[in-house]
Image (spheres, grey):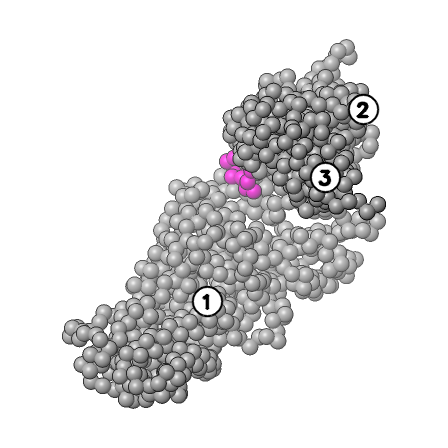
Amino acid sequence: MGPRRLLSFGDALVLLGGDPPAMAALDRVLSGALNLATGGLSGELLNLLGERGQILGLGRTAARGLGERLGRTEGRADRAHVLEAAHTVVVVLAFFEALEEAELPVSLGDLELTRREQITLAGGRLPSDEGFTPAMVQVDAPRPAPHLPYEHHITELRDWYRHLASRVHDFLQGLAAWEQLNGTARLAAAETVREAVPRRAVEQYEALYARLATEAPEFRFWSEQVEHQATRAEMRRALAGLEAHLSASAALRRRPVSIADALSRAHRSALDRRVLDAESTPEGIRVPTLAEVYLDPDFRVRAVDGQGSPANEEWWAGTPVRQDLTDYLAGALTSEGFTTAPLLVLGQPGAGKSVLIRILAARLPAAGFLPVRVALRDVRADDEIQDQIEQAIRDTTGEKTTWPEVVRSAGTAMPVVLLDGFDELLQTTGVHQNDFLVRVARFQEREREQGRPVLAVVTSRTAVADRARYPEGTVALRLEPFRPVQIQAWLYYWNQANALNFAAMGLSSLTWEEVEPHGYLAEQPLLLTMLALYHAAGSDLRGADERPLGEADIYEALLSSFARREVGKDARDTASVVQLDDRVEQELERLSLVAFAMHNRRRQWVSTAELDDDLAALVGRTPARQSGFRAPLGQAEVALGRFFFVQRAQSIRDGQRLSTYEFLHATFGEYLTVRLTVQLVARLLGHRPVLSMGSEPVNDDLLFALLSFAPLSSRQLLRFAKARVGQLSADERRRLADLVVRVLGERELRADQPHGAYLPRRIRAASRHGIYSANLVVLALLLTGGTTAGALFPSSSDPGSAWHRRALLWRSSFDELQWTDFALSLTVRRTREDGRRDLVITFREGELAPPEPVDAHWLFRVPREEQDVIWRRPYWNEIWHKMDVSAGTNDGLALQALRPLFEQLGALVTTFNGGGTRHATSVAHDLLRLWLAGESGIPLEEMTELYRRVGMAYHWLPEDHAQHLTSLLIPLLDRDVPRYSPEDAQNLIDALSYAVPAEVLSRLNHYIETLPSDPT
């Protein structure tokens, strides 16, 4: 809701039919007593109590006359003012009725003193003749809002009543009559005024509010009290009921004429339009109209308060999902608050934002509203809001006019400007339009000042909502995905519309059981339509084994089906099956390059210009396709213009049409990225050297160009990739794995960058090589199911070091998020084969688990022996310096945590103890294990071994380090030795005695002497 326009109590009574001079006098008497924000004056409170009789009488009369006053309103704006006035009156009336009923030990009638006496008693001073400023007489009580739960409003109102009652109580305490009461009476009176009166005021308010709701349905919409509890689960279609709601609450004295009437007719025709045009549907299928199949979506709604962004899921976490869109819109469109800031409708691509706007424009009754739908993609982006509206009116009606003329032609109807596609402005012009919502609010402010209040609704994709600036009072509404029951209802209407067609074509109805496995697609209305069209084309959502198609299989089937239908339109039965298959594959490859254009730019959309450049760099320039007398179509338009599952955003700037493309669901792009990747890898099998003697590098030019800008290690990409690779034979996977390893080695020795004109984003050449080699490792893992560093780097004498050097390259090539995705997708296990260090690398399965313990034998290539092996490295002081110089977040975190250890016991970090079959560990590791064991109850055998290994470190430690270790070891022994029996304690002494200082041995002997005798 927008910034509030507060009414005084007198103004409210005038709007409801009261005598203006008398009401003005009442306002002067009440002054600021009913505006808690101003603080009020003691004299004003005394006046307020003194005038309670007049307030009660006038308020009751005004409330009873609401119905008659509404019958004389001039249009929606006038009606909204009257309703606001009625609410102001009942808020005040409820408090005074509660105060009048209260049983107080002092009569309020006794407080009717002279003006001078009142102020004197209150300790105030006389005001000037001018009285108080108009702001002082406004009533700042909370009011209901359609985006807030009614319970929230009642809570705020109760707090307001309590504040007002508290001020009344504070004032009463200063009167002589109060001083005459005994302590018990004062406590009882205080309880009555501060608690009982506010509680009773809320009860009176709810009763009065319910009475208002019988006179004006808007009050029910504002408070979610519409009588629809029994039908909440009913699937409402196409905002059915909205027109009836709004028509019942407003009858125009002046009907729309001319342009306004033409707009109304144009908008209403949208209900009879098909969901998709005939060219997008299989032959013989009837696509239902919007009125038949559009289901009112669930939604969340909340005010934009500056805390967080509506683009983030966390921002919506505490907001409940609602299922009463028709009722909510009825409340929003009859609320004055939305004439000060726009309602922002958000949703994912394919969620139905634009369709909602079309239906809303069609459902708004001419008896009260003037809807104007502005498709922002079709108007000049740099124009002022008014110019954009006027251009949209001309496009809709064919008539050129001005906005003021349109408003006048609407009579007393409330203009509603529906601005569809704010995200398209942001996407095509960058930050150039990030103040668009602010400009809409300014337009509303100007119109309100000119006596032409206007409601505004703006639509946008959720993902770009963080790039907008929000004016005060903006409310955001987010459309939610379909629930299963909504999907089932949609299927019912679809099957009903096509029952005869399905029978004639020998097709069965599309059932919930077939759609349910693909719910992640079906929850978006447009993608559900895509599944229905796929089924209607004779395709099956189940495989040959009657099991649901897998995730990758359904994407392949959907995309191939739609590509085949589009190719078939061009071929017109003149192409053979083989030719059709080739053309379908060309379409899918072109779509895959589009997917790479988005993937490599690390965003979910790409502009026409960028896509044209990419296609030219990768496949060469092709002649532009002529389309009638229009400008020739570029490669991007040819590739995407006919696929309805690709959304095109556009705007007009400086006379040029700017366009961007985006898949309706991000997973379409991810699947196509993986699809082409696996195809290009599979084509490596066709590598043949020119000469039979010798060899030559494998031609991986296109693979390098596409896979050297972004990693393939996200979860969704890996799921698709595993499925696609799984369709290759075992022999193909084995041979391809060898080729990928070969390419990995060859590419590291090449400095060229094939397809040099292909630059979706500018990154360092070294980073491209790092990203490409990481992607080749991912591909090798996909083909093998798991491999070793030795297999990946066969020319290296130390595969462990080879892996480490590449990992540093990958880390420097990725940003932190990419590195995290990559690292968390893998697990490594350190091994030794024939005395050579190696790593077993596999994809991680399941939840993230702690890594395997690191064996220092492996790290330092120290051979195992049966007895203890102790060694140290002198460069511990260099380790934390190198961590510091790297200045990385992870190194910094580890350095911060370990700094005290380095400062006091740095040598323990590089002193190691191994031997036998156990892992070799540093003394620092063993000491930390002992310290952190606490009461965890590690076995005594393990504890004894840890103490023994720590004690052995004394042979190697400098004197200052030995002293620090002793100061740490003695408290640990004090904690742990009492848990030992005398025999176990003796074993511990034996383990420590040959290495630890005398001070420690003395403490151990003391423990032995104080331990109880072993009963055995």
Residue at image position (52%, 75%) is 225
Amino acid type for the residue under numbered disc 3: Ile
**Res. 611 visible in picture:** no
Magenta region: 601-611
CA neighbours of label 1 inside 10 A, class few (<14), some (14 to 19), many (20+): many
Indicate whether 353 appears above or below 861: below
Question: Can you say which quadrant of the picture contains the C terminus?
Answer: top right
Q: Is residue 607 magenta?
A: yes
Residue at image position (46%, 71%) is 155
Q: CA distance from mark 3 to mark 2?
A: 32 Å
Residue lying at the far top of the rendered structure: 693
Question: Can you say which quadrant of the picture contains the N terminus?
Answer: bottom left
Q: Earlier in the sequence, mark 1 or mark 2?
A: 1
Q: Which residue is mark 3?
A: 1008
Q: Relative to the observer, which residue lies in front, 582 or 145?
A: 145
Quarter holding residue 726: top right
Q: Which residue is mark 2?
A: 866
Where is residue 776 shown, x and y percent of the image? 68, 28
Quarter holding residue 638: top right
Where is residue 229 shown, x and y percent of the image? 59, 75
Q: Earlier in the sequence, mark 3 or mark 2?
A: 2
